[in-house]
Image: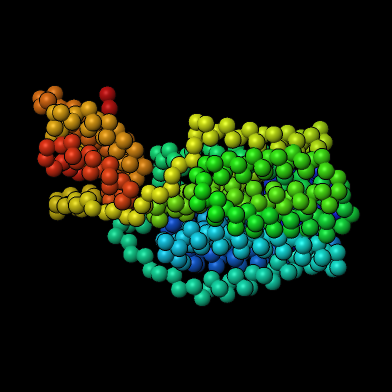
Amino acid sequence: MQNVGAAWLMVSLGAGPIYVALTQTAASLPYFLLALPAGSAGDIFDRRKLILFTEFWMMAVALLLAVSTIAGFMSPWLLLALTFALSAGDAFETPTWRAALPELVPKEDLAAASALNGIEFNLARAVGPALAGIVIAAAGVAAAFVVNFVSFFGVILVVARWKRPIRNRTAPRETLAGATVAAIRYVRHSPAILTVLVRTGVVMFFSSALFALLPSVARSVSDTAIGYGLLLGCFGAGAIVGALVMQSARDRWSTEVIVSAGVVVLGVAIAAIGGLHRLSSLAPVMLIGGAAWVIFISLINSLVQNLAPDWVRARVLAIFILVYQGSFAFGSAAWGAVAQRAGIHAALVCAGIGTIGTTVFAVFAQLPDSSADLSPWNHWRMPVVIKEVESEIQRGPVLVTVLYDVIREREAEFVEAIHQYARIRLRDGAYRWGIFRDTESENRYLEIFLVNSWAEHLRQHERQTLADRELERRLRSYVASEPEARHLIYTYSKET
């Protein structure tokens, strides 16, 4: 209801297509700006308290938006500013909100819970816009903003009563800056996650034209907000149908096939909308587009959640949201500018063709499998610290060495495996890695890696997962004896 009210108010203020498109940009840009610190905060601080804080912030902004509209102070730029502030609260909350889902249900129920959550959201998306159109027609835009303000009380009550389980930490708590760096490092060394992010960003850039230009399309076929609400309601209803169909489709086809098919259908719908001029013909196309949209976004979101372990899940989701909303914000502004110059029809046709064209990524960047077990696997022996270096233990960096006596016949396999293992070291905390061969012993290799601090190395012990176990076991099968690890604290260095 809030989104419909803001978009319709912008149109009612006499703003052109670029301002209407900027409404979507103002709603999306905070996700781009705040995603990384929001994800770090979601993994470091108490998730329940963080959600409560952001809910109170959004409720205050919603009240200011309603009061400004009722008092007649609203202008296009003030509306954009308040839309940005409201979205900023949601942006800071979203990574934590999504990361909390695995805490609420057992792992075996996570897929079903995610699907149920998608149905619930899109049911609200189907009903909300239609209700907004009725409320705006009957009582004005300000009434929709007042309803939005009141709705926060229910969310705050539920979250306040949530009894979140206590998490036991053995390693020191991360700092906000350190957690952000760890998130970037984790994603950088996770090819599967990078593939999902690239595919998401490209699709979102082109498909954002649908949401950015829909208010202008609705205005051209209907003089009231009811028409716009009806189109969004059809989109939400289609999303519900798509969520239900998706469950049976996943039993028959791979994620890649379903996602690519959804993107093609979505692209066709976007291109078709630009050439339709009646509500009766736009409505069924929006229904189909909504089904295709939810299939794409639900499967992509599920992939990201399943590819990230708990210790970094909120941060990885934050980077996903950053890419998602950043592409959305940039795309909305770009397609608004295209519509301003070339017309809405041309912009939507080009965006639809571009959306279809993104399926070419399936040829060389297929979506990954998400069946790996990311449960913690902290099997490493904790290093013993002698009394003489306890006062220096907080210094950095830390140098870790691991000596391997490799079986001669397995040397080539060992070298291949250790290079694969390097990605795990770098992903979980190391900032430099290397493998050296002993000149005095034919089959002896020395692995080294540097970690910023002792605390970060302790966290590194907690970050290995059961999915890493197979590679480590394979690596161990290539050596004649137990690898010998050493931990060295930085003391002094000098450069010539």
Q: Which quadrant of the figure contains the C terminus?
A: top left
Left or right placement of residue 156 versus residue 175 in this view: right
**In the image, is residue 168 above or below residue 379?**
below
- Residue at 60% from the left image edge and 54% from the top image edge: 245
Q: Nearer the viewer, residue 410 or 324?
A: 410
- Residue at 68% from the left image edge and 51% from the top image edge: 290
Percent position of residue 201, x then y = 58, 40
Q: Nearer the viewer, residue 361 or 187?
A: 361
Q: Is residue 94 visible?
A: yes
Give the residue at the far right of this rendering. Answer: 223
- Which of the colour schemes (rainbow, by chain, secondary structure, one colour) is used? rainbow
Percent position of residue 92, x then y = 56, 56
Left or right placement of residue 206 versus residue 418 in this view: right
- Residue at 60% from the left image edge and 42% from the top image edge: 261
Q: Is residue 317 visible?
A: no
**In the image, is residue 483 above or below residue 141?**
above
Left or right placement of residue 143 versus residue 456 in this view: right
- Residue at 86% from the left image edge and 68% from the top image edge: 138
Percent position of residue 163, x then y = 45, 73
How many labels sit on residues? 0
Percent position of residue 205, x then y = 64, 39
**In the image, is residue 164 above or below residue 169?**
below
Q: Which quadrant of the figure contains the N terminus?
A: bottom right
